[in-house]
Amino acid sequence: KLSYGMKMAEGDLIQTLADDIWFHSIEGNRKPVNMEEVELRRKHFSIAISGLYKIQRPILSIMNTEGYSNAEIEEWMDLINTSLKLVQAVQRADKERFKYLE
């Protein structure tokens, strides 16, 4: 079992990652008016995607340690994976959506 200090460290990591994911998703959601802003949008979404990958392991660790059921763990992982797919889909669609700004 993890020590209290390790749980707190993982909890802090989850909070930091969640804050970063939220911030970069919001910042990336601004409609660009030129290619420089398209690139900035892409960077924000890339950081959000990276955060969604990184947050999975510490969430699983804490949930397993705290005795969450498999159904609860699967539900949280499904939420993260759905978020990941949505942000990735927006990023892929942007290539076509903003090509007129070139």
Image (cartoon, rainbow, N blue to C red):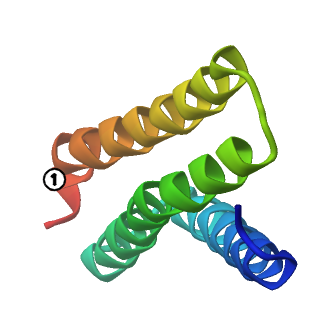
- Residue at x 59% of width, y 61% of height: 58
Residue 26 lies left or right of residue 67; in this view the side is left
- The spot of residue 6 in percent (x, y) is 73, 79
The location of residue 98, given as percent across then percent down, is 26, 52
The residue lying toward the viewer, choosing from 54 and 100, is: 54
Residue 30: tell me if it is visible: no
Q: Quadrant of residue 63?
A: top right
Q: In the displayed structure, does residue 71 sit left or right of residue 55? A: right
Tag 1 residue: 99
Identify which residue is drawn at 69% across, 73% down.
Answer: 10
Task: Tell me which residue sits at (69%, 67%) in the image.
Answer: 14
Give percent across and percent down for residue 30: 57, 61
In the rendered structure, the answer to whether residue 21 lies left or right of residue 40 reads: right
Q: Quadrant of residue 84?
A: top left
The amino acid marked with disc number 1 is Lys
Question: Which picture quadrant has residue 34?
Answer: bottom left
